[in-house]
Amino acid sequence: MWIFSRYKDYTPLWTDVASLKQANRAHALRILAILLVILVSVWYNGYLIAKLAKKWPTPLDNYQQLNPNPLLNDEFYQSFKSPTHDETAVVTCMYTDSYATAIATLGHSLDRVNSTATRLLFYLPEHVSSEALCIATATGFVPHPVSRIAPPHNGEGTNKRFLDAYSKLNLWTLNDAGYKAVVHLDADTLVLRNFDELFALPYRFGAVPDVYVGSHGFALEFNTGTLSYDEIQADQAFLNQYYAASAVRLPYAYNANLAIKVRKPAMWEDLWKRARVVHYTLVKPFLAEADNSGETIVPMEGLEENIRARMGEFDGVFKEELLEWLGQWKETYAKYGEKLKECEGKVGDV
């Protein structure tokens, strides 16, 4: 009896082994489940990262020729009154002599579309020669010297081409001069159709969104050009930050960036038919081949040869647009040739 009582709670060894095996199987299953969750999580996060890096396609990346309607509402256009000359201005900026012929051509293109606003040329006297200023203002731009606004941190982190671009912020001084509305055009643009309706906008600031050939694509940021912002693009990045939530994004017709033609040719085909302003971003017809820095000046007599030499860039996709610029330059020279010739070799204070 004593012996029986002594071993009454005894569990045979084979029972412990079976329980151990069962526990091990359950533990292994839990480990497999955890590994499976980790693998699924890694895969899903990798998928999201890849999607974000590639960017979700936008309606512009999937552009289709669906909308036949005109850019402007007919009722608005019929009731619209031309802006007064003294209260509105078209402004461009000149920081280097190499843009003189571009600005002269831009001035003529404004003539062709019967622009009624005052034309002002912001320029830096210390950077622009008398000859270049004479050429640039031969077609109607009024010279308007401005003080250079230096980039922050002595330009560290700012693209070399944009070191003077903060001077564009002098635009906000024109209100003191009596101007109620201002349209700024980059010097490497050409006007194809009248855009006087922009002077009637009720908003404080409007700009056209930027476009990139690469993965950034159709951007929310607009093209122009202490806050925290990407200083490499100078004034554009600053203004994007300042007007981040209040800027009105204008249709691409008001700044038809050549990058659109590379990124979405079908969209460009429609855009070209209604574009008010074309922006020669990727190929600048007035600058020397492969020198978009603006350091090399192309003389007036060499412009046509230079343009034809550049037509093969980007596999010749911009031939039509370059011919458009060349045609308007020829018109400019035919109309203002004598005045432009008088500018050559001109010296003196600016």
Image (cartoon, rainbow, N blue to C red):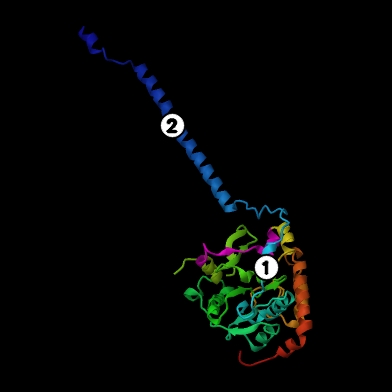
**Which residue bears the numbered disc 2?**
30
Q: Is residue 282 visible?
A: no
Please state the horizontal and vertical placement of residue 284, each as a whole percent of the image. Answer: 69, 72
* Side of 88 relative to 307 (left or right): left
In this picture, is 249 found above or below 327? above
What residue lies at 51% left-to-right and 39% top-to-bottom?
40
CB within 8 Å, label 1 to label 2 = no
Q: Which is nearer the N-term, disc 1 or disc 2?
A: 2
The disc labelled 2 sits on which kind of residue?
Arg
Please state the horizontal and vertical placement of residue 38, each as a whole percent of the image. Answer: 48, 39
Specify start and end residues of the magenta stretch as a single range.
241-263
Nearer to us in this view, 260 or 33? 260
Assign a secondary structure to mark 1.
helix
What residue lies at 20% left-to-right and 9% top-to-bottom?
2
* Side of 205 relative to 329 (left or right): left
**Residue 192 figure quarter:** bottom right
Assign a secondary structure to mark 2.
helix
**Residue 311 figure quarter:** bottom right
In this picture, is 70 found above or below 97? above
**Which residue bears the numbered disc 1?**
79
Q: Badge 1: few (under 14), some or many (20 or more) residues near its Cα, within 10 Å?
A: few
Residue situated furthest top in the rendering: 1
Residue situated furthest left in the rendering: 2
The disc labelled 1 sits on which kind of residue?
Ser
What residue lies at 44% left-to-right and 33% top-to-bottom?
31
Please state the horizontal and vertical placement of residue 172, each as a whole percent of the image. Answer: 53, 76
Nearer to us in this view, 120 or 146? 120
